[in-house]
Each structure stands twice: as C-alpha cells, then as structure tokens.
C-alpha cells in the first residue's frame, strides 16, 4: 500500500505538490520583481505631466504666465545632485595640422573637434563635467527641459532646440525625417505649434524608459549662437517686430517685476522705430535678474544654452554654429544620411538676420548701462566659455 500522511495525501503526491509549490513561488517572486521595476522605471504621461506645472500650463495653452509661480529648475536640480557624478571630460588632443590641404568636409571635421574641445575645457574648468548616475531621477527633475528635445527613431538622432538658433529650420528637418509631407506645416507659423504637439517631441513620450534610451544612445545635435546676438534676435521677434497676446502677457510680467506700470506695454518706440512691448533695456533687466528668472523662467528664449541642452552632461555628437551655419548643417545631415534635407533649413532667399549685423548689435548695446552689460555677462558666461565666443562684442561703444 502507498504510505499516507496525516491529512490523507500519499507521500509521493505530497512531494510532487511541494515541488509544484516551490516553482510557483519562484514564478510569483519573478512577477513581483518585474512589477516593481516596471513601476519605478516605466511611468506614463501622467507622471511627466504631474511633475511640471509649467509644462502642464504650456501644453494647456495658458497665456497668463504670471500664474506659473515659483518654478525654479536650477534650485530643483541642485537639490538632486545625487543623480550626478563628477567625471572629467576626456581631453581632445587630436587637433589636425592646419597646414595640410583640407577640403570643406575636412574643415568641418576640424571644427567639430575644436567645438567639442572648447566645451570639454569649459566644463572641466567650471567643475561641471558630470555624468548622470540616476537617469529616472534626472528625467523627473528636468522634465521641463525635455520640451526642448526632438527625435527621429528611424535615424536614431535627437536634437536639442535652442530658440533663436535656427530652430525653425531644424524642426522642419525633423518633421520630414519623421515622415511629414504636408507643405503647410513647413511654414514658420505652423511648424512650431505642430512640433509642440508631435509624437517626436521628447516631453510628449509616455514611456520614461524610452525617454532615457533616446537620451543615452541616440546621436545628438545642438545649434549654438553668440549669446548677445541671440538675445537681440529674441527681443526683436517676440517684443518688437511680431508682438502677440502671449508675449504681451510676458511684457506685463516684465514691467511688474521692475515696479513699472503694465499699461506702458506697447506704447513706446524702440530704436527700430516700432512700438515695442517693452524696451530692450527692460528686456535685458528682466532676463538677467537671477531672482526674477528663477520665479518666471517658463520660456527658453532667454535661458542660456547651458540650462537648455546641458552640454556638460551630454556629449553632443554634432555641434552647429550659426556663424558656420551652412557647412556645419550640410555635413551634419550628411553624417546622419539626410543631406538632401538641407533645403528645409533655409527659407527661400535666406538672408542675414538683423541681429547678426555688427552695427545692429552695437545699436542695441548702446541702450544698456555698464551694470546691465555686466549682468548679461554673468548670466551667459557659461555659454561664452563653452562655445568659445569672445566677450569683446559686449564692449560698450564710446559715447
């Protein structure tokens, strides 16, 4: 007869039951571990929306920017430094001899080496060359910044948008790279709102895991510009030449922050002869006052590139300078296999912007006091150093 235990189970059957229970426990343990990891690293859109009041307001189309409140991403980042680890950048010593014959593509390669060496040197000198050690936490802290990144999965390429640095053209390129064909979308007035809502904007991605994967592994592009020229261009475009309701609200916020009457918005002429929303002096006063910027910093148009694209934390594969725009873009697109898209970078009959003209910059610079010029230097010093721009352009003209 088969031996029975006290509960009536045959001994062999009991052993089999225990074996099945053991394997069931192993499977259950694996499932619990998977769910835990999934909850930590695989969040949905609600996670991204909940951690950035600014992003939520902007996506909802709110115009009352003064209601954004005390959003200080610099402070937030400093409170989460445990997600970063200081790692000195590798010094780039392979500078090609400049005396050897070199075609245009070779010259571009040499510029890329110089650009990256400049960034690495600046990051090391400022002790800011940091490696991200906790990507999930970094994404959480810097969710606002993710609004500046656009990607193409097909080309495994990501682009950090710097406003007033040829961002319109590069968005056109990424629109086409992502399969876009509607010519109406390619206009300057349409490409920006379309890209904001697109599924190729990193902040619109539901999966944090995919966000991290793209940031870590995709080829990266950044377009930079001399800071003062960028500031003049931003002022002309948003507060002087093309004012609208959204920027009027910002203008009122600027005047309020400086203790001035908001009713002055749009009543005074600037040096261009247009009725500007605010004067250039008021614009620079607002954008260089760090305490004010920390409170109302919901727009990247007046943020340093160092706070938008994090060049000391990401090793950019391609750096494009406005000053060498055509060649830098052409060979960058060639390297990612889309040289034919160069046409989308430039509007028909492309021309030099007013802010790129030295006489125009001098005219605007003459509107500033020495203290304001000094404040501007302090605010954008990291950009000047990282991208090797000379501060001599900020020498005040003789009065």
Image (cartoon, helix red, strand yellow):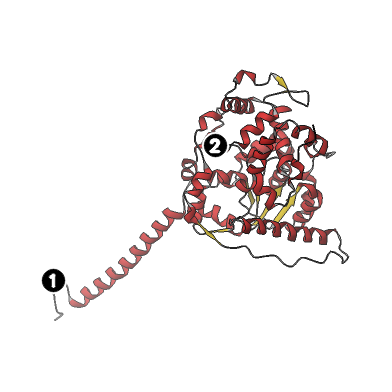
Tell me the residue at 23%/75% (across/down).
15
Mark 2 vs mark 1: in front: 2
Task: Residue 305 in the image: state x and y as whole percent.
Answer: 65, 46
Q: Is residue 200 visible?
A: no
| 398 lies left or right of 198 | right
What separation in Å lies between label 2 and label 1 (alpha carbons)? 78 Å
Tell me the residue at 49%/53% (across/down).
81
Q: Which residue is mark 1?
A: 8
Task: Residue 130 in the image: state x and y as whole percent.
Answer: 56, 58
Q: Nearer the viewer, residue 298 or 24?
A: 298
Tell me the residue at 24%/71% (across/down).
17
Q: Secondary structure at mark 2?
A: helix
Q: Please, is residue 55 above or below residue 115 in the view?
A: above
Q: Nearer the viewer, residue 108 or 274?
A: 274
The quarter in which the N terminus is drawn is bottom left
Which numbered circle lies on residue 291?
Answer: 2
Locate residue 24: give its quadrant.
bottom left
């Amino acid at each position: 007869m088969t031996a029975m235990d006290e509960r009536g189970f045959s001994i062999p059957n009991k052993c089999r039951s225990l074996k099945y229970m053991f394997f069931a426990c192993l499977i259950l343990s694996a499932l619990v571990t998977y769910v835990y990891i999934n909850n930590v690293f695989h969040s949905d859109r609600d996670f991204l929306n909940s951690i950035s009041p600014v992003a939520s307001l902007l996506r909802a189309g709110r115009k009352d920017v003064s209601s954004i409140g005390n959003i200080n991403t610099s402070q937030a980042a400093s409170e989460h430094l445990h997600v970063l680890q200081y790692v000195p950048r590798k010094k780039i010593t392979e500078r090609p001899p400049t005396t050897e014959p070199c075609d245009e593509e070779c010259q571009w390669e040499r510029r890329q080496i110089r650009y990256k060496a400049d960034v690495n040197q600046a990051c090391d000198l400022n002790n800011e060359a940091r490696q991200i050690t906790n990507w999930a936490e970094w994404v959480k802290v810097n969710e606002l910044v993710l609004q500046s990144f656009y990607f193409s999965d097909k080309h495994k390429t990501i682009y950090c948008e710097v406003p007033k640095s040829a961002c319109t053209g590069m968005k056109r390129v990424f629109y086409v790279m992502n399969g876009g064909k509607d010519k109406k979308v390619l206009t300057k007035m349409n490409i920006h709102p379309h890209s904001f809502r697109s599924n190729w904007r990193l902040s619109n991605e539901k999966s944090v895991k995919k966000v991290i994967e793209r940031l870590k592994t995709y080829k990266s592009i950044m377009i930079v510009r001399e800071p003062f020229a960028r500031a003049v261009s931003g002022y002309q475009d948003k507060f002087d030449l093309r004012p609208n309701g959204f920027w009027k609200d910002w203008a009122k916020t600027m005047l309020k922050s400086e203790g001035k009457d908001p009713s002055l918005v749009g009543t005074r002429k600037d040096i261009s002869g247009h009725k500007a929303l605010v004067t250039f002096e008021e614009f620079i006063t607002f954008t260089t006052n760090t305490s004010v910027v920390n409170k109302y910093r919901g727009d990247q148009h007046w943020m340093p590139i160092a706070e938008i694209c994090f060049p000391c934390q990401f090793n950019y594969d391609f750096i494009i300078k406005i000053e060498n725009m055509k060649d830098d873009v052409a060979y960058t697109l060639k390297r990612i296999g889309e040289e034919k898209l160069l046409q989308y970078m430039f509007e028909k009959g492309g021309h030099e912007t007013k802010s790129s003209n030295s006489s125009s910059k001098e005219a605007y610079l003459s509107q500033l006091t020495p203290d304001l010029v000094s404040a501007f230097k302090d605010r954008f010093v990291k950009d000047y150093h990282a991208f090797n721009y000379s501060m001599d352009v900020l020498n005040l003209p003789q009065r």
